[in-house]
Amino acid sequence: MKHLLLFLILLSPTLVFADCPRTTLANLPALSREYRELRKTPSEPKPSTEFIQHKAEVMDQLRQCLDYMKADRKLVVDTLGAPDRIVKKGELLYKMAFDSVKFSETPPHLDQAKEALIYEWRGLHDFMFFLMDGKKVILSSWWAALE
């Protein structure tokens, strides 16, 4: 299966993932570079609304593709950079992130989650997270303070 996916990636650089319609394999590296630049912008003084919205859009496009691919930990970190926080199962922040996800059906292997890789959008007010089984993405989502 891994070889088939690699073959499809090499065969069609414009292959679009069903769950990330605006993101293609061909522009994943460009989005990664863009996110890393956006991430460098300090949160003080307060960035413009347009900047904040654009950063969230870029982050979410990357999140959707990495989740859809059930990317391994190395690919997540290679794409997004080091997480702002790594929170182990049982820690308070992990519980906050996990409890914020509402499921119509429990995703398979969720009980195998061991940690959350957290990427801040607006500090810990709002962040994107990847629940990991130690090797790959189980699921990803957003946590919002709803202030």
Image (cartoon, rainbow, N blue to C red):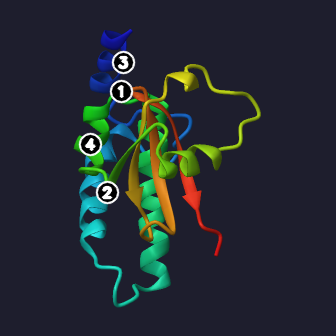
In the displayed structure, does residue 143 sit left or right of residue 50? right
In the displayed structure, does residue 100 sit left or right of residue 137? right
Q: In 3D space, how far apart are the residues under numbered discs 3 and 1 (Cα atoms)?
A: 22 Å
Q: Which residue is mark 4?
A: 77
- Outermost residue on the bottom side: it is 45
Q: Which residue is mark 2?
A: 84
Looking at the rendering, which quadrant does residue 104 occupy? top right
Looking at the rendering, which quadrant does residue 122 occupy? bottom left
Foreground: disc 4 or disc 3: 4
In the displayed structure, does residue 100 sit left or right of residue 3? right
Foreground: disc 4 or disc 1: 1
Q: In 3D space, how far apart are the residues under numbered discs 2 and 4 (Cα atoms)?
A: 11 Å
Q: Which residue is mark 3?
A: 5
Q: Position of residue 121 (x, y in %)?
A: 43, 65
- Mark earlier in primary sequence (2, 4): 4
Question: Are the residues tagged 4 and 3 within 8 Å (C-beta)?
Answer: no
Q: Amino acid at mark 4?
A: Val
Viewer-nearest residue: 131 or 37: 131
Q: In 3D space, how far apart are the residues under numbered discs 4 and 1 (Cα atoms)?
A: 13 Å
Q: Amino acid at mark 1?
A: Gly
